[in-house]
Amino acid sequence: MSKIVIATRESPLALWQANHVADRLSELHPELEVELLGMTSRGDQLLDRPLYKVGGKGLFVKELETALQDGSADIAVHSMKDVPMALPPGLTLGVICEREDPTDSLVGVSGFDQLPQGARVGTSSLRRGSQLLRHRPDLEIGFLRGNVNTRLAKLDAGEFNAIILASAGLKRLGFEDRIGQLIDPDLSLPAGGQGAVGIEYRDGDDRIAELLKPLHHVQTAACVLAERALVRRLDGGCDVPIASFALPDGDGGLWLRGRVGSTEGKTLLLAEGRGRDPEVLGYDVADQLLQAGAAELLAAVRG
Ligand SMILES: NCc1[nH]cc(CCC(=O)O)c1CC(=O)O
C-alpha cells in the first residue's frame, strides 16, 4: 500500500488546510495511507515582534521544506501568502488549490463608519495598515500577531475596537459569523496568494505529482503566479506593504492590480494591467510601480 506524509504547521488554520488536503487525497485514492506530520515553525514561535522585524520571509515554511528535503515528508501544505518568492533548489510548488475568498475582513464592527475617530484597529500587516490609514488617517493601528484564534481572543479581551484578518482563515475555521464586513479590495487590496493553498514537494517526484494532480486549480494558479511575479520583482514578501491581486478578466486573460504603500499611509502607489501571460503581466505591473518610486518607498520601510 502506498503512503503519503504531509508536513504542516500546527496552528488551527494550518491543520485545517492540511486535513482538507488529506481528506481530498483519501477520497481520490481510497487505498492511499495519508499521514500528517505536525511541526512548529519559527514564525509561530517569534510572536512578540512584527514579522518584518524578524525576517518575515520564509519563517513559516522553512522547517516544512527541510522535512521535504530530508525525506521525512512527501508534501508540505502552505498558505500561499506565507511562501517566499524563491524556493530552495529541488523543491516545486506544483499544485495550487482553488482559492477561498481572497479579501480581508473587518472584525468587531460592521463597517469602518462604525469606528469612532481615533479608534484602535489591530493588524501587524504593513500592507493592511498602510491602506487602512489612507482611508482613515485618524485610526490608530495596534500591534497584533498570533494565529487567528489568538487574534480574535485579543479583540474579545478589549485590546482593540476592531481587527483585520484574512476572510479565508475566518471562513475555514468556522468564524464566518465574526466577519463584520468583507473589505472591498479597492480599500484593502489583498496580499499576493491570499486565500490560496499551495502544495510543495520534491521536484521530479512523479508519484506525488500524479496523486496531487486533481487538486490543482488552473485559474487560481494563473492568478497566484501573476501576483507572485509582481512581488518577486519588487523583492518583497508579506513583511512589506505590497498588495498584489489578480482576477480573471472575463476574456481569457488576467487583470492584475498592485500597490505599494508607506507605513503611515501618506503615499500609496497604484498600478494595474491586463494580459494573458501571468509572469509577464506580474513583471509589467511591478515595473510600473518601480517607475513610480516603489523601490525607494520599500527601502524607507525596510530602514
Ligand atoms: N500570515 C498569516 C496568515 N497566512 C494566511 C492567512 C489567512 C489565510 C489565507 O490567506 O490563505 C493568515 C492569517 C491572516 O492574514 O489573517
Image (spheres, grey):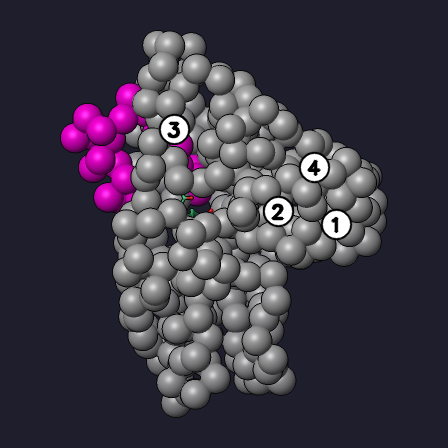
- Sequence-wise, the earlier of marks 4 and 1 is 4
Q: Are marks 1 and 3 in contact (CB under 8 Å)?
A: no
- Label for residue 141? 3
Q: Position of residue 181 (x, y in %)?
A: 42, 23
Q: Residues within 10 Å of mark 1 (few under 14, many from 20)?
A: many
Q: Residues within 10 Å of mark 4 (few under 14, many from 20)?
A: many
Indicate whether residue 159 is drawn in magenta. yes
Q: Residues within 10 Å of mark 3 (few under 14, many from 20)?
A: many
- Label for residue 299? 2
Q: Residue at x 54, y 47 (%)?
A: 303
Looking at the rendered image, the quarter that the N terminus falls into is bottom left
Up-down relation of residue 300 to residue 199 (above or below): above
Region in magenta: 148-168
Observer-nearest residue: 152 or 33?
Answer: 152
Q: Are marks 3 and 4 in contact (CB under 8 Å)?
A: no
Q: Residue at x 39, y 73 (%)?
A: 63
Which amino acid, mark 3?
A: Ile
Q: Position of residue 2 (x, y in %)?
A: 42, 87
Mark 3 → mark 4, Cα distance in angstroms: 24 Å
Is the residue indicated by label 2 positioned so its CB lies within 8 Å of ligand 1? no
Which amino acid, mark 2?
A: Ala
The residue singled out by tag 1 in the image is 282
Q: Is residue 73 visible?
A: yes
Is the residue indicated by label 3 positioned so its CB lies within 8 Å of ligand 1? no
- Label for residue 23? none
**Would residue 257 be found to the left or right of residue 142 on screen?**
right
Describe the element under mark 2 as helix, strand or loop.
helix
- Sequence-wise, the earlier of marks 2 and 4 is 4
Up-down relation of residue 78 to residue 205 (above or below): above
